[in-house]
Each structure stands twice: as structure tokens, then as C-alpha cells.
Amino acid sequence: MKLPRWFHLFGSPPFVYRLASALSPWLGAIACTLIVVGAYWGLVIAPQDAVQGEVYRIIYIHPQTAYVGMLAYVVMAVTAGIGYIWRIKVAHAVAVSAAPIGASFTFCALVSGSLWGRPTWGTYWEWGDPRIMFETLLLFLFLSYLALRAAFEDRDKADRVSAILAVVGVVNVPIIHYSVLWWNTLHQAPTVSKFDSPSMATEMLIPFLIMVAGFTFCFCWLLLNRLRAEIVERERDTRWLQDALHGGRA
Amino acid sequence: MIEVLNMGGHAAYVWPAYGITLVLIVFNVWAARRKLANALSEARRSSGTEQPRSQPKVRQLS
């Protein structure tokens, strides 16, 4: 199979490093602006919910953090798979960079969900709820990926073995998404990500979507920053990096 | 203002949820920057002691 030129370009550590360095400040600025605007809109301007009152305002961070956790897992699984198949170092570097970000956002989704559950469901934690359980499994998949990598001295071996775990675990992501439809549980069904029409008032939907965009940019920003560090660690003794360091371009 | 802070009596749930999200984002930004700074300083240091990746050695076939 003949691969397009850009595919090879994205396999080149110097190219990816420079691209990530150039994009990083822009992504950071966009992410911070969107999150500040979205949070103010959601917390202050948006009207209160007819059923849940003010506590519903957690909806401006809880689904977003959960979505970023799942996005991070998909990014990790896809890049780990690409790295495994084509033996591309940069792809493995992306996978490693996505894991801690995904773990922290998944943890965040579990905590904010638990804080939302207490006043609305009457409990912080429900062992019988499939979505909570699969989301917890997602957190443990991230942690076991990181733990598995830490068990290897040799980075190449760690890349290859952990890639298998990452790819196998991706089956959990659609299960999390559909869990509220497959099982009748405490967790509410999707409000926005329905294929027909989202059942949310426009004045609530706008800040919701601003926050979705803000968290997506935030994830990309964090990913690129970690990726830069990961590339520098992996390419420590290469010519291009040493040249860049001494030429003052890195 | 007070109304916003009070969150209809649910301040104890809404604000910690936002707080922990903010703390985690800030922590992630800080951790990524520190990792990059460490990696760069290590790469600078290694340049003094180690040679850049050498070319494959060619051996004369006899």
C-alpha cells in the first residue's frame, strides 16, 4: 500500500515537534478563551433548569470532561495501533502523551458526576450503574496502560506491549456511550448527542457547545505540550535536536 | 452575585465540581510544561557528554 506524503511527514519527529511548538500557544489561547466564556455563560447567564434548579449547571463541565476522557482513549488507541503496525515512533509518542491527560479528565468526570449524583439521585456512587462502572473501567485502562509501560526498561518494548492493551481496551468506549441506552439505569439518557434533535433549550445549548469546543482545544493543547516533551526525551541524542538546541531554535 | 455563589442551595456540589476541573486542567498544563523543560535541559546536558547519534560503523570485509 502506498501511503500519502503527509503520512510520512507526520512520522518525522522534527516536523511534528516544530508543528506542535508552533500550534501550542494558539490552541492554549483559544482553549482558555472558550472555557472562560463558556463557564461564565453557563454559570451566570444561562437560565436555571425547571426540574433540577441550579445544580444542573454541572452539565457545563461533566459531559465535556467525560467526552475528553473518551476522546483521549480513542486517540491513544488509534495512534498506538498506527505505531504498532507501521513502527512509527511519533505515533507511540502521541499515545503515551494522551494517557495521563485522559486519566485526569476521566477522574474529573467521575468526581463531578458523583457531586451531581448526590442532590439529584440521592447518592454519590452507585455500583449497579453501568455507565459509572464502565467509566471507572476507562480510568483503570488508562492507569494500567501507564503502569504496564512503567514495567519496561526498554522504551520500544513498552511501546509495543502497551499498544496491544490500548487497542484491545478501545471496545470500552462505545460501551460507555451506549450504556445509558442499553441498560435502564440511574444515569440520564443523552441530551445533546442524539441523532434526531438535541432536547436542550438554545440558551443552555450554546454555552454547552462552547464548553465542548473549549475542552477539545484544551485537550489538543495539553497533548501537543506533552508530545513535545516526549519527542525531546526520545530524540535526545539525535542530530536535528542537538542542532536545534545549539542553534537556539528549540 | 450572592445568588450565583449560592447556586440555589447547591453551592456545595456545583463549586467543588468546577473547582476540581479547574485544578486538574491547571495541573495538567503545569505538568506538561515541567516535563518539556526537564526533557530540554536533559537533552542540553547530554550533548556535552554523549556524541550525537553516530553513523553506522563500516567494517572492511576481508
Image: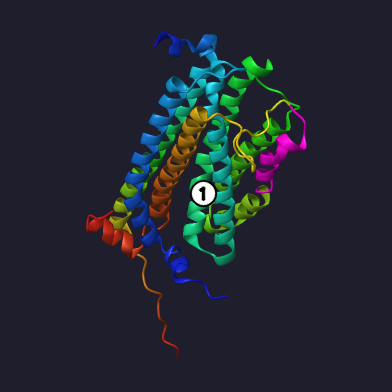
Foreground: A193 or A199?
A: A199
Q: Which residues are magenta?
A: A170-185
Q: Is residue A114 above or below residue A100?
A: above
Residue A47 image offset from top left, x and y in percent: 50, 20
Residue A63 image offset from top left, x and y in percent: 57, 33
Q: Amino acid at mark 1?
A: Val
- Please tell me which residue is depicted at 42% across the width and 66% down the height of the picture: A9
- Please tell me which residue is depicted at 66% across the width and 40% down the height of the picture: A177
Q: Is residue A89 above or below residue B13?
A: below
Residue A115, located in which quarter of the rendered image?
Answer: top right
Foreground: A176 or B42?
A: A176
Residue A72 horizontal side relative to residue A196, left or right: left
Residue A177 falls inside the magenta stretch? yes
Residue occupied by mark 1:
A96
Q: Is residue A160 above or below residue A194?
A: below
Residue A86 image offset from top left, x and y in percent: 55, 66
Residue A15, located in which quarter of the rendered image?
Answer: bottom left
Q: Is residue A42 above or below residue A148?
A: above
Residue A113, located in which quarter of the rendered image?
Answer: top right
